[in-house]
Amino acid sequence: MITIQTDDFDLAEEYRNLRSVAGDAGAIVTFTGLVRELYNPADSESDKIQTLFLEHYPGMTEKCLQQICDQANKKWPLLATRIIHRVGELSAKEQIVFVGTASAHRSDAFESAQFMMDYLKSNAPFWKKQSSGGQSSWVDSKQTDKDALKRWQG
């Protein structure tokens, strides 16, 4: 199941829902991404992110996220998957993304969650604009995120 929303999410509730849907799971893996205060570790104190604004294209984004879940379900024997991605204006340290997977075995749950995050970071159509020090700029995708996909291809 996928959701794109402006509101925050409750980790405990999402875990309970995954556990309920998965039935007799042997492993549940969850990942929660947060808005970083410093986008680049070399940034100075004055470069701290005040807000991150996320835009998406309704319909297209949901389709992409569903495809990511579908791909994970084809690669691993999963009992449940969950993606939540927030949009709108977020402050530093707020939750931005949730990925959860459930499977009979921990390796499948861990690998599928990593796969889903790698594809979210590289392929999901979200546009991010960060504000810091009274200025704002669009955030470019990082080469390291693109490179992470190579692990899953081939």
Image (tube, grey):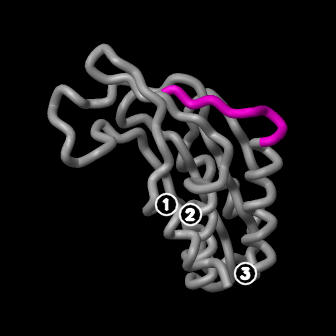
State the separation of the CA atoms marked 2 and 1. 7 Å
**58 magenta-colored:** yes
Indicate whether residue 141 is drawn in magenta: no
The amino acid on which the numbered mark 2 sits, given as a three-letter code, is: Asp
Mark 2 = which residue?
118
Q: Nearer the viewer, mark 1 or mark 3?
A: 1
Q: Position of residue 132 (x, y in %)?
A: 31, 23
Extreme top residue here? 134
Q: Which residues are magenta?
A: 53-60
* Mark 3: secondary structure: loop
Amino acid at circle 3: Trp
Q: Which residue is mark 3?
A: 76
Asked whether residue 85 is in view, the answer is yes
Residue behind mark 1: 145
Earlier in the chain: of badge 2 and badge 1, it is 2
Q: Earlier in the sequence, mark 3 or mark 2?
A: 3
Q: Is residue 24 left or right of residue 85?
A: right
Identified by mark 1, the residue type is Asp
* Quadrant (top left/top right/bottom left/bottom right) for the C terminus: bottom right
- Measured as percent of width and height from the top left, residue 81 is found at 71, 62
**Vertical comparison of 117 with 8: above or below:** below
